Image: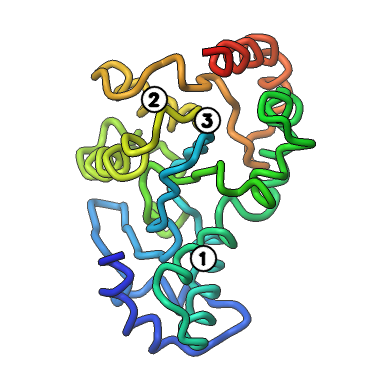
């Protein structure tokens, strides 16, 4: 929670608003680091780690929508004088894969039959009453923007950027290795490519990774076809994982 403590005064200086603009948050105050055309900003929602998580969903980096929701949630709870642990947990709960991406993700996990292996009615339970079994994170924990737009995992690829891979390795140490062999669901090829680097280095087992899972973003117009084509193989990976 060190970064939260570092930025807490700056967050308190923000007015309490129903919605923040990029002019409010994408400022030098919250700029963490810059590398070429990439800029990384602080956001309070990826500092909470659920070390009891059995299911891990990994994204690339939080986008603007997630960042804004996290700040809005944290600022409101700071006003209510909640403690740090409660604030970062609530910010994460509100922001994790929020919006249409969460809806698509739940539908895709339902289609693969994940709930049946967990004895859940549907995958939405992972974001609700069974939240204690879920840990979500992005390989790059803090929002990265490329020329002012959401970084999408390309230009450059994460594994080709020492700047970004440094943060991905930190996430491996803080969020993946402390968990007891979770099922890892990478969201899209950019995340999968980084996972393969760690698999090759012996840090993560391939058998615990649902490689080939399509990115659930609405921007991925091929996700339905990709899931349909890979459904049988992905279901078999789930069956094998939960059988061991």
Q: Residue furthest right?
A: 121
Q: Are marks 3 and 2 in contact (CB under 8 Å)?
A: no
Whether residue 24 sits left or right of residue 214 in the image: it is left
- Quadrant housing the N terminus: bottom left
Q: Are the residues flagged by discs 1 and 3 in contact, CB closer than 8 Å?
A: no
Q: Is residue 240 above or below residue 225?
A: above
Secondary structure of the residue carrying numbered label 2: helix
* 123 on left or right of 81: right
Q: Earlier in the sequence, mark 3 or mark 2?
A: 3
- Within the image, what quadrant is residue 143 found in? bottom left
Image location (x, y in percent) of residue 91: 51, 65
Q: Which residue is mark 2?
A: 193
Name the mark nearer the viewer: 3 or 2.
Answer: 3
CA distance separating discs 1 and 2 = 28 Å
- In the figure, 42 relative to 9: above or below? above
Where in the figure is residue 213, as x and y percent of width and height? 58, 24
Identify the residue under disc 3.
185
How far apart are labels 3 and 2 at the CA level? 13 Å
- One can see residue 143 in this view: yes
> Residue 2, located in which quarter of the rendered image?
bottom left
Residue position marked by numbered label 1 in the rendering: 91
Disc nearest the viewer among 1 and 2: 1
Pick whichever of labels 1 and 2 is earlier in the sequence.
Answer: 1
Task: Please report the residue visible at 36 percent of the width from the left and 46 percent of the height from the top.
Answer: 140
């Amino acid at each position: 929670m060190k970064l939260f403590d570092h930025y807490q005064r700056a967050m308190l200086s923000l007015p309490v608003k129903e919605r923040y603009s990029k002019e409010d948050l994408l400022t030098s105050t919250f700029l963490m680091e810059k590398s070429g055309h990439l800029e990384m900003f602080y956001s309070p929602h990826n500092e909470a780690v659920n070390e009891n998580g059995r299911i891990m969903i990994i994204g690339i980096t939080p986008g603007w929508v997630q960042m804004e929701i996290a700040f809005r949630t944290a600022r409101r709870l700071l006003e209510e004088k909640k403690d740090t642990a409660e604030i970062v947990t609530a910010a994460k709960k509100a922001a994790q894969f929020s919006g249409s991406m969460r809806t698509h993700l739940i539908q895709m996990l339902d289609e693969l039959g994940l709930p049946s292996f967990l004895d859940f009615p549907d995958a939405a339970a992972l974001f609700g009453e069974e939240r204690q079994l879920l840990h979500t994170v992005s390989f790059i924990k803090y929002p990265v923007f490329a020329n002012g737009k959401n970084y999408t995992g390309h230009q450059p690829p994460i594994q080709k950027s020492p700047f970004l891979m440094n943060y991905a390795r930190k996430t491996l140490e803080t969020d993946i290795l402390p968990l007891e062999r979770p099922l890892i669901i990478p969201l899209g090829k950019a995340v999968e490519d980084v996972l393969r680097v760690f698999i090759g280095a012996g840090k993560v087992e391939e058998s615990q990774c649902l490689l080939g899972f399509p990115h659930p973003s609405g921007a991925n117009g091929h996700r339905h076809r990709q899931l349909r084509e890979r459904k049988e193989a992905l279901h078999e990976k789930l069956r094998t994982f939960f059988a061991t």
